[in-house]
Image (tube, grey):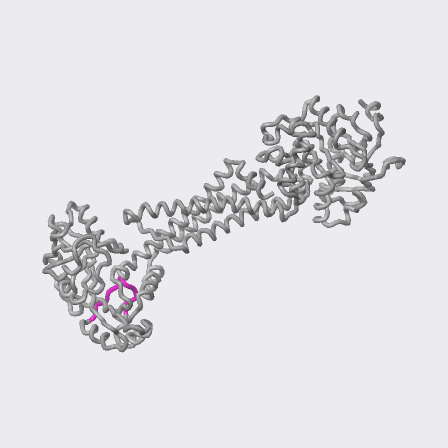
Amino acid sequence: MLRLALKMLYGDRAKYAMLVGGLTFCALLMSQQVSVFCGLMRWTTATLRNVQVPIWVADAKVEQVNEVVAMRDIEVDRVKSVPGVEWAVPLFWGLLNARLPDGSFQAVQLTGLDTATLVGRPGKMLAGRVEDLRLPNAVIVDQVGVKKFKKKGIELKIGSTFEINDKEARVVGLCQSDQSFLGQPYVFTTYDRALEYAPPQRKRLSFVLVQPKPGVDPATVVETIRAIPGLTAYTSDDFFHRTIDWYMKNTGIPISFGTVVVLGIVVGIAIAGQTFYLFVHENLRFMAALKAMGARTRTLAAMVFLQAFAVGLAGYGLGVGAAAMFGFGVLKGGEPPFYMPWQVPVFTGVIILFICCLSALIGLVKIIRAEPAVVFK
Amino acid sequence: MNEPANGHQSVAIEARGVTKTFGTGDSAVAALKGVNLDVRFGELTMIVGPSGCGKTTFLSVLCGTMKFDGGSVQLFGRDLAAMRDAEVTAFRGKNVGFIFQQFNLIPTWSAVENASVPLLLAGASRQTAEAAAQRLLDEVGIGQKRRSYPTELSGGQQQRVAIARALVHEPRLIICDEPTASLDAASGHHVLELLQKIACRPDRCVIVVTHDSRIFSFADRIAEMEDGQVKAVHGRGEYHAQYV
């Protein structure tokens, strides 16, 4: 009977297409929007991936990685003295304006790495060598910078120059980095040179990057550093989640995306629920005939639920597949943000399952209530 | 009026004082007002009467697809009123075959799939059910149309598929609701011939509700209903000679 239930469903092609279409749209809207949301949230933590270290130390008031409260340089030495710390190096991070050869400006995220060790260096070089950062006025620009400069008519390559705060910056390398929430290119240089580029101020140290000694639990080191007045510390994972939490609590982004997702669910329920109800309604006479012929309620329930799940599976597959295709498409271009962790397909699957169950239940109630004698009317 | 109780064949269905009312209060309509009828094995019994006299309601009660308010119905020795819903459903699935006015063939299933449904519902495998359905389709003369869908069949052919479906699980009671109403005279006649030929057996009874006077001659007995009661029961040829 289950095979025939599917045949009953697939045989009514118009209704089947409508049902699958509704659920596809719902699954696409949910998975695509949630993935864009996740991508956006991931962008907020780009600095954590572009500068990979186990422990970040910041001013005690810092709540997320894109927030900088400058510290005194002496904090690096205070952190170095903490038991369990293998090494600690300074990091400068700030938004500055770069002046291009044509006189236009481009905001950049200037990242100053420890001059001696270049800890936090770009993970993937597209051209040039990281070590060349030690050359005079040397900077490395990421792919976002290449794209942004190109939009302004400037082909960025090794040897190109521009100015930051009236000081020359000479490109010695191009790198691949994670795009950030702010959307501005990362420009890597040494810590000392970054301080030269940055406007003069009393405190200029943004973060202290820390490596715990082998065998020492990073969480223990974090706790010890937090005991130092005026400082806080986070493991990279903790900083990642705190940053996302901050954006969730302090921006309208979750509400904006959440509204679209809820609309997707409502539209999905409305389209799929109504169409499935119509499908059941049109087949009610046949279902009643099956009841008259001795079909038990559980047989009819199995048929209806199978039909609902078959539609749900097709809609889910097409919808999430379309969202994934969208993701592959946009990831090449880098925008809009898109990140689909495994939780997104699972979440979408659960919602689609809910819609299918609801639709099937509505249909089933109608079938159960139908007296088999209706076939004689 | 009570039916004469002098039949020599054994009684398959015994209805006594069956009542059924639809609605309540001022809008209540008494569809059955104490109906008595015996249906015997080996006979084709027709229930006739004007529209609204309660024929279809009585048929629904007899085969256990509708609950009744009062009286009793003994179906093959079982008291329908005493059985639980699930029991009635299972009993009906095993013992009753249906032929409907609108055929009620599922349009997206082929002839053989439609005809095999009662066996599938009884738990038979697909192969067994389709083999039995194929035998019946052959018997009703449309074996070559086994893969055709209802929309590809004429009304007469669809009704023959419905007959195959009604008989495939070897039920003891065949219920026919206006089986010729959607057919032309020739097809209707052929359907009744088929029913008489392959459905009527000593261990089985056939009940036909109909308005179609052209087929009255096929009946072994005709129960004439009027205003929610069986007014008279006529033997073979009696009603035909009297009214047609």
Residue B52 drawn above or below residue A159: above
Along the viewing direction, whichever of A166 and A134 lies nearer the viewer: A134
- Residue A246: x %, y % from top left: 33, 62
Examine the rendered structure and indicate whether residue A265 appears above or below residue B107. below
Work out which quarter of the rendered image holds the N terminus of chain B and state it: top right
Magenta stretch: give its range. Answer: A61-71
Left or right: residue A20 compared with residue A65: right
Q: Residue at x 41, y 56 (%)?
A: A343
Quadrant where the image shows the C terminus of chain B = top right
Exactly how many numbered labels are in the figure? 0
Q: In the displayed orientation, state which residue is furthest to the right.
A: B6
Is residue A294 in view?
Answer: yes
Q: Would you identify the image quadrant in which residue A86 lies?
A: bottom left
Characterize the magenta stretch by its predominant secondary structure.
loop
Whether residue A65 appears in magenta in the rendering, the answer is yes
Please state the horizontal and vertical placement of residue A375, each as a whole percent of the image. Answer: 67, 37
Q: Position of residue B23 (x, y in %)?
A: 71, 43
| In the image: residue A75, left or right of residue A260 | left
